[in-house]
Image (cartoon, rainbow, N blue to C red):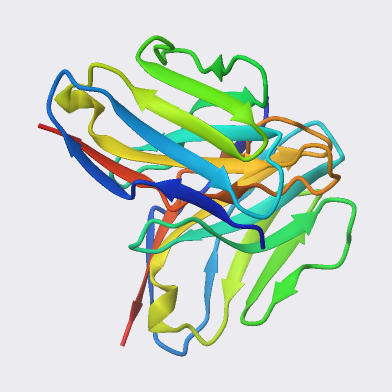
C-alpha cells in the first residue's frame, strides 16, 4: 500500500507554545488529508478535512484558530496546535487519499503523541 | 447519516484459535466500501481487509476473512489461527462509493490473543 509519513512521532512541549505536525504522502498525491484525534481506548475522532489548495473544513466543536491546518501541496499537510495546553495532550493521526482515483482507500500516518506540560 | 456499530468492546482468544469480530452498519445507499483496520500497540493504523458492496464474494486476506451480509448490513471479521501479533484494536469502517469524505469508524474492539 501507499506510504504516509507523519512526524514527529512524539513531542513534548510547554504550555503556551505551538507545535507543528507534518503529514507527507511519499508515493502518491494526496488530494485530501484528514486529521484525527484519538483519546485512550477510543476510536478516531475526525477533526478536519483538508483539500489541497483549499481551506480546511473543521468538524463541529474543533477550534480552527487553535488547530491550524495547511495543505499547500499534494504531498504535505501540516497541523499546528497553537498555544497548546495540557488538555490538548492526545494522539493525533493523519490519513491521506487521492480522491481522483476510484479507490477510496485512505492511508494512515504513524500518529503523533503530543504531551503538553 | 451512516453509522457503524461494533458491539464487542473487548474480546480474547487463545493462540491458534479462531475469533469473529462483529460489525453492523446503517446506510440507505447501495454503493459503498467496508474496511477492517487493525491498530496494534504501536498505534499505526493498518488496513486488514476491504469489501466492495457490489461484490457478493466475501473478501479474504490470508488468515483474515469477512462475512458480508448486505441485506442484514453486517460485516464481521474472522481471524483464523490467531497469533500473538494479532493483539490489537480492530476498527470497522465505512465509506460511500465515490465519496471524497472521511471514513466512518466504529468504536473498536480490543482483541487480546492469549498464549
Residue B31 % position (x, y): 86, 41
Horizontal side, residue A65 vs residue A70: left or right: left
Does B71 appear above or below A81? Answer: below
Q: Which quadrant holds residue B11?
A: bottom left
Horizontal side, residue B114 vs residue B32: left or right: left
Does B21 appear above or below A12? Answer: below
Q: Which quadrant holds residue A18?
A: top left
Q: Nearer the viewer, residue B72 or B55?
A: B55
Residue found 44% across the figure and 57% down from its top: B44
Q: Nearer the viewer, residue A114 or B3?
A: A114
Horizontal side, residue B20 vs residue B114: left or right: right
Does B5 appear above or below B109? Answer: above
Q: Quadrant of the C terminus of chain A?
A: top left
Residue B6 % position (x, y): 51, 48
Does B104 appear above or below B38? Answer: above
Residue found 56% across the figure and 33% down from its top: A34
Residue at the farthest front position? A73
Residue A73 % position (x, y): 64, 31
Residue found 36% across the figure and 43% down from its top: A42
Q: Quadrant of the N terminus of chain A?
A: bottom right
Residue found 68% across the figure and 42% down from its top: A97
Residue A50 % position (x, y): 60, 25
Q: Nearer the viewer, residue A62 or A15?
A: A15
Amino acid at each position: 500500500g501507499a506510504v504516509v509519513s507523519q512526524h514527529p512521532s512524539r513531542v513534548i512541549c510547554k504550555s503556551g507554545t505551538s507545535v507543528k505536525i507534518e503529514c507527507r504522502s511519499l508515493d502518491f498525491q494526496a488530494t485530501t488529508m484528514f486529521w484525527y484525534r484519538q483519546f485512550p481506548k477510543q476510536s478516531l475522532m475526525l477533526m478536519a478535512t483538508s483539500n489541497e489548495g483549499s481551506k480546511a473544513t473543521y468538524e463541529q466543536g474543533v477550534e480552527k484558530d487553535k488547530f491550524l491546518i495547511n495543505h499547500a501541496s499534494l504531498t504535505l499537510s501540516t497541523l499546528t496546535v497553537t498555544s497548546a495546553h495540557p488538555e490538548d495532550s492526545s494522539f493525533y493521526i493523519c490519513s491521506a487519499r487521492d480522491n481522483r482515483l476510484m479507490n477510496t482507500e485512505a492511508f494512515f500516518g504513524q500518529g503523533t503523541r503530543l504531551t503538553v506540560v | 447519516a451512516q453509522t457503524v456499530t461494533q458491539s464487542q468492546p473487548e474480546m480474547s482468544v487463545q493462540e491458534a484459535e479462531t475469533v469473529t469480530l462483529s460489525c453492523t452498519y446503517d446506510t440507505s445507499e447501495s454503493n459503498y466500501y467496508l474496511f477492517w483496520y487493525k491498530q496494534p500497540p504501536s498505534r499505526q493504523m493498518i488496513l486488514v481487509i476491504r469489501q466492495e458492496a457490489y461484490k457478493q464474494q466475501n473478501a479474504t486476506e490470508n488468515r483474515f476473512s469477512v462475512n458480508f451480509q448486505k441485506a442484514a448490513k453486517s460485516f464481521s471479521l474472522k481471524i483464523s489461527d490467531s497469533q500473538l501479533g494479532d493483539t490489537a484494536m480492530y476498527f470497522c469502517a465505512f465509506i460511500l462509493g465515490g465519496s471524497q469524505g472521511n471514513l466512518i469508524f466504529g468504536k473498536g474492539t480490543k482483541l487480546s490473543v492469549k498464549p
